[in-house]
Image (spheres, grey):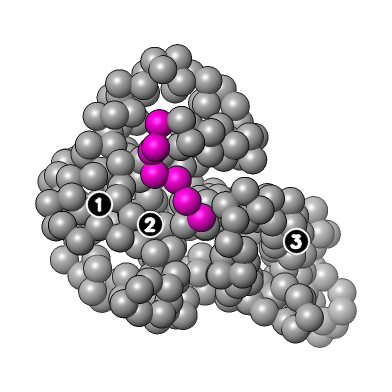
Amino acid sequence: MKDFAEYILSEEDLASKMEIVYYLSKKTKVFFDKSVVFKTEIARLFLNYSKIEVDKNLLLTACLLCNCKKVNNAQDIETIRSYAKAGAQYLRGMGFSKRFGKICEEINRYSNSNPRERESDILELVDQFGGMLLDRPERIGFKPDEALVLLEHRNLKNDYNRYLSTFIDFVNFMENIVITDKTDIPALKQLIKLYNETEELTKFIQKVIYDYEPKVDKLISKYTENMAQGMFCDIDNPNRPLFSEETARKIMGHMNNTNVVGANTNE
């Protein structure tokens, strides 16, 4: 199994990665369910939106595996506190680097690992926010805006996460991306709907990868282009852009990159 790390990291197609982890879970009983796929998709969307300079392949692999020792609906507090660290040790035994294990361990703060890796801050946001959107036995899932409030003012009230403000901007952005599915529905709510309506894990993966992703990526691209065109119009003649579409797109890309490296990341 020590060759497993090289094997999955060399596979950059996300659908294939999920298939690999699915069969690993069947063979070794590592934790892998719909919630992992759900949160990984949120991470993928966030990375595409933010343009944060991290290894996307590495991070999405960590998303799929960081909960490998999680126990579903665990009630024992020690199990809840120790699963991330136990998972990191397990992954190092499968050939992953010490840093990869550290990234996964820092999905939560129970191990008090410091300094935190940049990728870990993304995992933390995705894990906590994504988890709040889903139903649990003791409560129904929160709406995205409600989950954001809890994330910022309860979960991370006393903790610094370098990407929190960028993530808030991302969620607000996604609330403007509307998918037509019989009725118009915001993109994150559509992902939740798919999760709730699809019981089988493999079918959920297929719907996310081959149905949801192409639709949402196309809509995001169109929405971004419309924003760029709207920002650079001649005030006296709104129908005539000041710049060409190509120039506007370059300016928008520069602004996004400046935003990530500067104020939003505090780096």
Q: Which mark is residue 127?
A: 2
Crowding around mark 1 (Cα neighbors within 10 Å: few <14, some 14 to 19, many 20+) is many
Contact between marks 2 and 1 (CB within 8 A): the answer is yes
Crowding around mark 2 (Cα neighbors within 10 Å: few <14, some 14 to 19, many 20+) is many
Query: At 39% across and 51% down in the image, what residue appears?
Result: 122
Q: Which residue is mark 3?
A: 215
- The CA distance from mark 2 to mark 1 is 9 Å
Q: Earlier in the sequence, mark 2 or mark 1?
A: 1
Q: Earlier in the sequence, mark 3 or mark 2?
A: 2
Residue at 41% from the left image edge and 57% from the top image edge: 126
Q: CA distance from mark 3 to mark 1?
A: 32 Å
Q: Would you say 149 lies left or right of 244 here?
A: left
Residue 200 place in picture, x, y as percent: 59, 56
User: SS of the residue at dot 3?
Assistant: helix
Q: Main secondary structure of the magenta part?
A: loop
Q: Is residue 97 above or below residue 52?
A: above
Q: How many marks?
A: 3
Residue 97 visible, this angle: no
Whether residue 103 is visible here, answered yes or no, is: yes
Residue 33 belongs to magenta span: yes
Q: Which residue range is magenta in the image?
A: 28-34
- Judging depth in this view, the residue of 45 and 38 nearest the camera is 38
The quarter of the picture where the N terminus appears is top left
Tell me, for residue 108, which label it has, or none: 1
Mark 3 is on which residue type? Answer: Lys
Residue visible at 20% across and 70% down? 157
In terms of depth relative to the viewer, which is nearer, 247 or 45? 45
**Picture quarter containing residue 168?**
bottom left
